[in-house]
Amino acid sequence: MDLPALAMSRPGEARVQSEAVLKGNARPLDQTYALQAIGIVEREQGNLASAIAAMRKGIAISRRNVLPAREADLQASLGTALSFTGRRALALSAFERALELSEGPERARVFVRKSAAHLHFHEFTEAYADGSAAAEILARVGDPTWEARARTNVSWALIGWGRFAEAEDQLLTAQELAVADRQDYLAAIIVQNRGDLAHRMGDLPRALRLLYEARGRYDELGVFPPEVVKDLSLVQLAAGLTEDAATTADELVAVLEGARDSALRRSDGFIAAAIVHLAAGNAGRAADLASRAARSSRRQGHEDADRHARVVLLRAQAAAGAVTKRHARAAAALAAELTDRYASERLDALVLAGRLALATGLPELAEESLQTAAAGRRGRGSALRRATGWYAQALLAEAAGDRRAMLHACGRGLDVLDTHALSLGATELRARATVHGSELAALATRRVAIDGSARELLRWTERWRGSLHSLPWPEARQDAELTAQLGRLRAAGGLIGSHADEAERRRLEERIRRHVHGRDAGAARTAPAGTAGDAARTESRRRRRLEVRELLDALGDRTLVSIVGLRGGRFHVVVARKGRLKHVVAGVSAAALDEVEYAKFALRGAAVAADAVAGVLLSAAEPGLARLQETMLGPAVRELGDGPVVLVPPSTMQSVPWGALPALRERDVTVAPSAAAWLRARTSTPPADRRVALIAGADLASSGAEVGVLAGVYPDATVLTGDDATTDATLAALDGSWLAHVGAHGRYRGDNPMFSSLELADGPLTVFDIERLQSPPYRLLLTACESGVGSPTGADELLGLTTSLSALGTAGLLATVVPVSDAASVELSLTVHERLRAGDDLGAALLAARRAAAGARDRATAWSFLALGGA
């Protein structure tokens, strides 16, 4: 009978068939299979009492009818159910009885289930011994399916000991066995387990790749185990994909709420979903899910899960403002009670206890909790775990009044996260992963903003800003699979004005993201030879750090203005000018975003309106622009001097129309993601071959008028217009060029910034395409709508077209922060090119274009452009 096996894959069908057997005149043998199947279904639903009753009834029938093999199998199933209730002695007794009644392969199968029960009780030595013994017997008798299960148990025992490489070997062997025996469901489970192991090892690209593969295998089989969704949501969260993780977590909750056979999974699933929503800023949702998980755990007698759920609940309550001594003591108590099963969450509980204790005047409890947590900084765990340990060490030092030790701990934690970033092979993941350093960066920056020098504040701001520009860039040029997928996306109709099925487009986009997220980081463009770990350690030491003296020397008559917004506070500004640094405090940071949006709204309307209407809109915007200037710059305006200005704003403020601010309209202004990025761009060497590329995109109302004019100015330029302006031709023209101009419609994708694009003859040129360039253009002018807009993410990063180009090495970019009319941008483009040919850099050329703007609409258009970079 296949009913017990059916109970694991299709429980509803197994129950119907089993009940039909029991209602009929079935043989005792068949009755035992039916009762075992019902017991398994009840067990998986969390109805452990009913499960145990069904197993025992089957055992009784087996004894009456002298069916020792069936009794042995049922005793093993009973042992599994009893282990879930926490009754260890009774569970092991059932397994011993099963072993007495069985021999040969059947005895080995009992050992497999007994091994799993030992794992449930965290008895790794016993689990390893039973699993290994079973695997040896099953290999000898030629039972690949049960041998695969035995080796899977052995792998989990090895994981419990931290012997990850050996565990991976066992899982690979188990997967080969399952595939060879055509056990597709078991193979999918093993692939999922390998994904979980990769997560524990800190290899997030491989974890994502394996979990996506496992989910695909389950989909092909028509099954949907909640565990794979739970694992995926947690890995997405670790990778910084918070929005994706929240969507996956909601999918998990929906599955668990709608499936009666998931009670045993509900607690862990709700806990995972609560953790994700807490990280996404949804404290209320997290608290609700954690409370439900705690109730479900208590009903099932899962004490560890109950404790874990209560830790997450305390974290959610603290995020919502519940900071009391009672909460501090509760967090510390739960941290002490949690077992190694939740080691990472135990660390979170200790840090929570320490923070709450510091805030509520419990210094002894704070010291005890943070000291225990700080030990994790030197452990063998993942980079994120070690970074949390360094954060605990920093809090401990701050509480002790040891400023130097606190800053040292913050720096070491950020170093660990550099290594973590280098393990990721996708730009998006690297940008988003910086979120894990937000607390470390904020702690250090707050301190130096209060009592540090301007030099120290600039150094610390630079330490965590612009990581994409400071770390080696992931390799994408030789990714044939990515190239093919992008081609399919264009063939499906593209991203702009497409009549392709929306669901198909989304499916293709998601396939591309999954492929890129799972890409190994070993192919970083400047990565040295050797192991991935060696490469990460070496490259971490090669992070481009800002040398303040070098910066001051390179500025010359320029003034650099670095702006940082402290959480819930004011903007702090460091002004670097004439070899000196000065720290000033500007306006309240919370007030800036509304002003920015209003300014962009006014410019958006004025840039496409008739001149009279544009003048009215600009006049109405003047008070807001003045307020925005006061908020962002404050007294720094008086420190700007007469020369060019380099602005380094927070990522959330990079798309401010800086040229529209009253104090900057008559200045040569460039914007950079970091001072180090500006310095690199400023000191980069232009290509010896002064090759020019001119590209006119599809469907421009101006018919790419400026490109035709510019073709006469640059007679040797590569000119692509009409059907010739394809993606491949454009990339070839851009690669290694000295100057490039692209007049094309653009689309900023706030929902998915890596698909922000320029529209060409055969479809969109996305950020993923840009990353395929071997050598980006030295200077690039983009007259596309919103080409300068990016998505703020992570600690202080941007994702978008211009970010990728500047990080790849483009020294100067011209781009817009709002949509502009194609016609109005023609004169601006011609003026900018005229000044570039005369030897100006982009900032000076854009200033000339602002001064040349005659009417209000032309002025609004000029104000909407930014000069980015340093050339």
Image: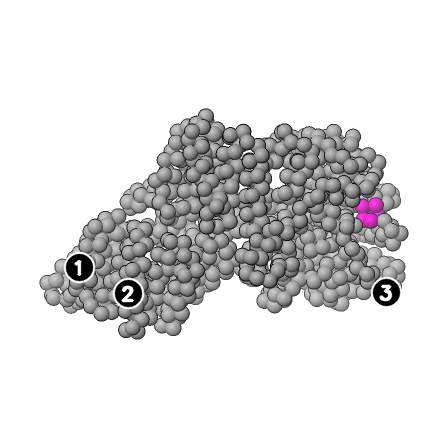
Amino acid marked by disc 3: Asp
Quadrant housing the N terminus: bottom left
Q: Which residue is depicted at the point 31% across and 66% down?
A: 135
**Residue 70's quadrant in the figure?**
bottom left
In x, y percent, where is residue 730? 73, 63
Query: In the drawing, what numbered circle is on residue 550?
Result: none
Does the stretch in magenta take in 764?
Answer: no
Query: In the drawing, what numbered circle is on residue 716?
Result: 3
**Residue 30 versus residue 858 in the image, above or below:** below
Query: In the drawing, what numbered circle is on residue 97?
Result: 1
Q: Which residue is depicted at the point 15% across and 65% down?
A: 68
Q: Which residue is depicted at the point 20% across and 51% down?
A: 90
Q: Nearer the viewer, mark 3 or mark 1?
A: 1
**Residue 200 versus residue 633 in the image, above or below:** below
Labels 3 and 1: the sequence-earlier one:
1
Magenta-drawn segment: 841-846
Mark 1 Cα within 10 Å, few/some/many (few <14, many 20+)?
A: some
Inter-mark Cα distance, 3 to 2: 75 Å
Mark 3 Cα within 10 Å, few/some/many (few <14, many 20+)?
A: few
Disc 2 on helix, strand or loop?
helix
Residue 233 at least partly seen: no
Query: In the drawing, what numbered circle is on residue 134?
Result: 2
Residue 299 at least partly seen: yes
Amino acid marked by disc 1: Arg
Mark 2 Cα within 10 Å, few/some/many (few <14, many 20+)?
A: many
**Residue 620's quadrant in the figure?**
top right
Q: Main secondary structure of the magenta part?
A: helix
In terms of depth relative to the viewer, which is nearer, 742 or 613?
742
Q: Nearer the viewer, mark 3 or mark 2?
A: 2
